Image: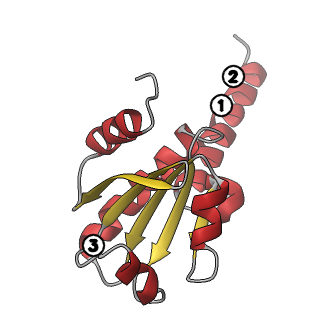
Amino acid sequence: MSDEIEDEELERLRENRREQLEALMGRGQEATGVVEITELNYADIIRDNEKVLIDCWAEWCGPCRTVGPVIDELAVEFAGIITVAKCDADANPSVMRSYQISAIPTLLFFRNGQMVGRLTGAYPKEIIRKRLVDAFDLLP
């Protein structure tokens, strides 16, 4: 293989990896497909989307910072299948009260407007992924 072809291939691999990392780092909704939940829009998002995962988190929460990137990865993996959203618990206390959330991180699973599951705590990606698959009857 010539040096020029190797350089082109290496640059292509670098660009692909850069795009993946940007998506995983949460460069806005465009990169990850993650929607921001607020007190004004949460009911509409739950009502208007068949399958919704909401990550309830806070900036100061260490376990939330562990789960956050996992949720971003799952948003990319399930793009077009599940609507993934994040709700800042401190900025949206009425949402937290509506779903009786007293500990974070808490993941809420909604299907056709109804809550079908919840997961509280920092779990590994595979456990969260399995709960998604089970809650929404997806193929593993």
Mark in front: 1 vs 3: 3
Question: Mark on residue 6?
Answer: 2
User: How far apart in space, not on screen, are marks 3 and 2 (Cα)?
Assistant: 47 Å
Q: Which residue bears the numbered disc 3? A: 104
Residue hosting label 1: 10
Q: 85 or 116, which is in the foreground?
A: 116
Give the residue at x 23% y 52%.
123
Left or right of 83 in this view: 53: left
Q: Where is residue 2 in the image (x, y as percent from the top left)?
A: 74, 14
- Residue 114 visible: yes
Q: Which residue is drawn at 66% across and 40% down?
A: 80
Could you tell me if residue 27 is visible in this image?
A: no
Is there a contact, CB below 8 Å, between mark 1 and mark 2?
Answer: yes
Q: Which residue is drawn at 28% across and 78% down?
A: 61
- Rounded to the nearest angstrom, the CA distance separating label 1 from label 3 is 41 Å
Foreground of the two, 25 or 5: 25
The crowding category of the residue bearing disc 3, from other C-alpha atoms within 10 Å (few below 14, some 14 to 19, many at least 20), is many
- Determine whether label 3 and label 2 are within 8 Å by CB: no
Residue count near mark 1 (Cα–Cα under 10 Å), binned few <14, some 14–19, many ≥20: few
Residue 19 in the image: above or below residue 40: above
Mark 3 is on which residue type? Ile
Quarter of the figure with the N terminus? top right
**Labels in figure, total:** 3
Label 3's element?
loop
Q: What residue type is labelled 2?
A: Glu
Q: Is residue 59 left or right of residue 33?
A: left
Quadrant in which the C terminus appears: top left
